[in-house]
Amino acid sequence: MQLGFRLAAFFHPKARLWVEGRQRLWTQLKNYQAAPNTAWFHCASVGEFEQARPVLEAFRKENPDWKIVLTFFSPSGYELRKNYEQADWVGYLPLDTPAQARRFVETIQPEMAFWVKYEFWYYHLTELKKRNIPVVIFSAIFRPEQTFFKSYGGFYREILHCFSHLFVQNQESVELLNRIGLTNVSRAGDTRFDRVIEIAQQAKRFPIVEQFCGANRVFMGGSIWPEDWNVIRTYIQTRGTATKLKWILAPHEIDVQQIERWATEVPLRSIRYSQATEESIASADILWVDNVGMLAGLYRYGQFAFIGGAYKDGLHNIVEAAVWGMPVFFGNKKYRKFQEAHDLLALGSAHAVADGTEFSQVLDGLLQSPETYQREAETSRNYVYTNQGATQQIMDWVRNRR
């Protein structure tokens, strides 16, 4: 793995950050002072951090004397949260080798570890188990096609036995783990529900965005890739001027040249958030979000949302939009690993669309039927609030364990 990232570093900025971050790791830890009470939280990237955050902050509140170490696998997570004030030390997860895992655990000396969703690093987990350090994984989700459940998956099943407890998102995961002999499993749901409700309750207002929206209906595009833009663009090109919708669009990658190019492809007036003024915002129809960190709070202004990633690497967070009460759209390719997508599709307030034509048909139907729109909006909001509580369940287990 390390060799692959070193080669990629010559061509890809994120791979370069991955390599350089791990080169600095032990220097950053040189003066680290171990504490008697330390909790280690590990996340893969940004999305998993949002799942970890409600548990980490609840743990911090109840245990203010504990030290918290936060690690990331990816540069995206580390670069965004390297100054996170609730953690005492933030860094990269060392390479998963016996020596590196042993050195890291000996350095930070955790008394408890919390891992999020998909992280299954053999040497780090076995090192924790050897030292009888309890490890909990939460917001995890398992599927029958995973190697854990194959006849040849013995090595991977061994990894799962390193966890003291597994908090999973759905009943299927409980049953799959039970079949391979794991009974230390609880269905707790996804901590992201707790997080997005917290964001919604604390969300600040953006006066310049409110001026942009006015009394118009607003369509949100969150974490959109070029493939998602192609679908949205189809609608704007054919109906954009007639529907009087306002559009707030946040690309997955903040690339000013790409934003400017996309803006020229549609007949509506555009402005980037970083350039918006009271005078310029009034005449714009599309507001491009050209920064990181605002999106979750901006969903409050939307009545519809298209969430990106499902035509590409995987669907981004649809719960951030659903909590505000709106129908959600996404691509019909790579959403099957996400329980919330299945749930909202089944409830009828989500739409997995194949292309711009299908998207246009469904959106037109919602615009023309206030009753259908209202039903879907209420369904999305109710779904999120009904599924809160995972953080409390995890913290109950932690209190009993300690």
Image (cartoon, helix red, strand yellow):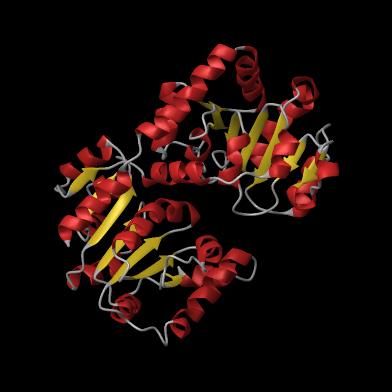
Q: Is residue 369 above or below residue 381?
A: above
Query: Is 24 left or right of 359, judged from the image as shown?
Result: left
Name the quadrant of the C terminus: bottom left
**Image position, residue 359 (x, y; %):** 63, 24
Q: Taking the image as drawn, is residue 63 in sight?
A: yes
Residue located at (52% from left, 43% from top): 316
Query: Is 148 left or right of 243, judged from the image as shown?
Result: left
Name the quadrant of the N terminus: bottom left
The total number of labels drawn is 0
**Image position, residue 217 (x, y; %):** 68, 26
Query: Is 130 left or right of 362, judged from the image as shown?
Result: left
Nearest to the observer: residue 145 or residue 76: 76
Q: Residue 383: which quarter of the image?
A: top left
Query: Is 306 left or right of 133, judged from the image as shown?
Result: right
Q: Is residue 213 above or below residue 54?
A: above
Residue located at (39% from left, 55% from top): 52
**Image position, residue 156 (x, y; %):** 26, 56
Nearest to the observer: residue 368 or residue 204: 204
Q: Residue 358: which quarter of the image?
A: top right
Q: Is residue 318 above or below residue 292?
A: above
**Image position, residue 335 (x, y; %):** 47, 37
Nearest to the observer: residue 147 or residue 230: 230
Q: Taking the image as drawn, is residue 152 in sight?
A: no
Farthest residue to the bottom: give it. Answer: 31
